[in-house]
Image: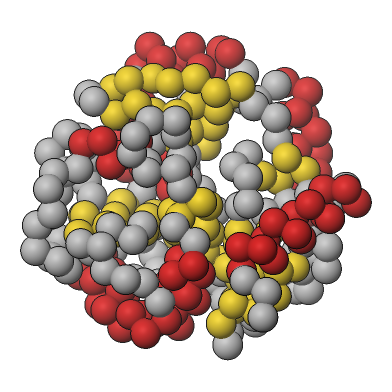
Amino acid sequence: MTSLWNRIRSTGDQARRRGALISVPTERTIIEDRGIPFVIHVTTLQERKNRARIEKADSVFNPFLPPDPDLLIGDVAPDHVGVLNKFNVLDHHLLIVTRVFEPQEALLSRGDFAALATCMHEIDGLGFYNGGTVAGASQPHKHLQLVPLPLGAGPHPTPLDSVLLPSTETGIPTVVPVLPFAHALITLDGMRLGGDRAADLHRFYRRACSAVAVDDETRPYNLLLTRRWMLVVPRSREHWRGISINALGFAGSLLVRNRDELNHLTETGPLAVLKSVVDGP
């Protein structure tokens, strides 16, 4: 059987040739904030206009029922399929989509973690979930996401890893002292991922959610997961000064649409921006 990684690469190459996959061109810069080297992707004005027009057209239907066959990776779990992100800033960006409709606001199930962990067993990546539109979700159909690591050019898998302390007890919620907003971090201590670890991951996730009062589907939040740690962050706002923030921001990767937004972000500092969309202004 062809590996997931090979399927992602071969499907992506073919989809790009057919025009089904649109890679968003960006320039990348680094903003250092309290020891975290945030990676900032800056798009062009024209690309922003093109993407806004396409996203407006996409908003009138569910692109996952059925998914574009040119972007379809295939089954990744009994109840989930893999689909390439049509508008990707990061290469090989995989969406892990429920086979039948479930709302994006829903809390994650053991089956969701089985699908994500199965993919991460093969691909050392950052898995994430935007729990609702306030948390940065662009589609109402439940989907998790996975991007390969590393996110930046430094020595760490993600910019956030540069400030994580040595491992504490596995599975116990804690906090990262440098982060100035509500969050819960759980160390996985290199736990080997795979579908058989879904029960552990789901249990840890519920502990992290409880630690930050994400108790039901009315509270938006972001989940981030690597092979080494899990992070849950509650949300109160989607935007800061027009800049949309999703889960990737809390790993240290942000997208801005132009130089003005980059200047605003630089002046304020990424951590203050993240704090504003978690705790409010």
The outermost residue toward the left is 169
Q: Is residue 92 above or below residue 117?
A: above
The quarter of the displayed image where residue 58 is located:
bottom right
Is residue 185 at least partly visible in the picture?
yes
Left or right of 1, for residue 191: left
Residue 266 at x, y percent in the picture = 41, 15
Q: Nearer the viewer, residue 1 or 167?
A: 1
Is residue 206 at least partly visible in the picture?
no
Residue 3 at x, y percent in the picture = 62, 71
The outermost residue toward the bottom is 78
Left or right of 239, for residue 17: right
Left or right of 264, for residue 7: right
Q: Is residue 263 above or below residue 148?
A: above
For the C terminus, the image quarter is: top left
Residue visible at 36% across and 57% down? 226
Residue visible at 31% across and 76% down? 202
For the N terminus, the image quarter is: bottom right
The outermost residue toward the front is 1
- Coloured how? secondary structure
Residue visible at 59% across and 77% down? 76
The quarter of the displayed image where residue 65 is located:
bottom right
Residue 275 at x, y percent in the picture = 29, 35
Residue 91 at x, y percent in the picture = 63, 45
Left or right of 21, for residue 242: left
Q: How many marks?
A: 0
Residue visible at 12% across and 39% down? 177
